[in-house]
Image: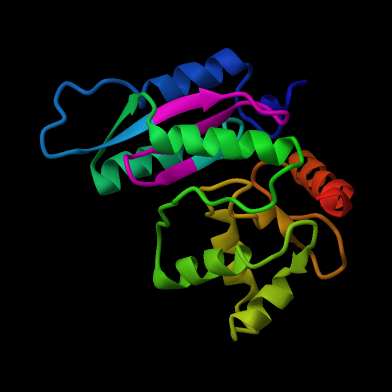
Amino acid sequence: MTYTQIDSCYESDKDLHDSLTKIISAPESTQNQQMLYAKWIDSPLGEMLILTDDTALHLLEFTGRRGLYTEITKLKEKYKYAIVPGENVITTSIQEELKSYFDSTLTLFSTQVKFYGSVFQHSVLHTLQTIPYGETRSYKEQAKILHKPTAVRAIARANGQNQLAIIIPCHRVIGANGHLTGYVGGLLRKKWLLEHEARNITNI
């Protein structure tokens, strides 16, 4: 089984591609629409999808992520984006940074990103960015930092709505008992990412 099929409802990578291609294609008209450019890339953990405009990265997801089709459809319908195959300087930037991350020579991403959601969701994503490479934090600790000790479940939901895999490191959040939990990209990927960072922290 490939990583792109982990936790996926699709029978094959081709089925997954066919489904996504239906919503990522040249529209009949782009008048009054902002363009997002889509590119599929390979990674050690399976195929990923990049969505960018000319100023920021809007989405970086494993194509086997649960709910990815719905996620992209929401971007199109709610924000009236035209999503077409293509790439730009932002695409190049995140590809280069991802390569360095997987090569164990980069710990902090600098590609400009776009956040979606409420002010609360933004605050949760910003706290994720403060978790150092090679370390983990519990949902309870995240709630404490946000001064919302009773909002653990809401924070966990906001983590799950992160559209920027790896670079906004929701994989570094674990259960209070130390168990791996709550990663929509699949717990095998989460385990791999944490072990990759822990293994390389002393070498960087």
When the figure is inspected, residue 158 is found, relative to residue 36, above or below; the finding is below
The magenta-colored residue range is: 38-59
Please tell me in which quadrant of the rendered image residue 141 appears: bottom right
Apparent side of residue 157 relative to residue 46 in the rendered image (left or right) = left
Apparent side of residue 49 relative to residue 196 in the rendered image (left or right) = left
Q: Foreground: 44 or 142?
A: 44
Apparent side of residue 162 relative to residue 81 in the rendered image (left or right) = right
Apparent side of residue 59 relative to residue 41 in the rendered image (left or right) = left
At horizontal 42% and vertical 45% (from top left) the residue drawn is 58
Location of residue 18 in the rendering, given as x and y in whole percent from the top left corner: 47, 16
Q: Foreground: 168 or 109?
A: 109
- Can residue 69 be spotted in the picture? no
At horizontal 61% and vertical 26% (from top left) the residue drawn is 47
When the figure is inspected, residue 18 is found, relative to residue 9, above or below; the finding is above
Residue 195 drawn in magenta: no
Location of residue 95 in the rendering, given as x and y in whole percent from the top left corner: 55, 33
> How many discs mark residues in the rendered view?
0
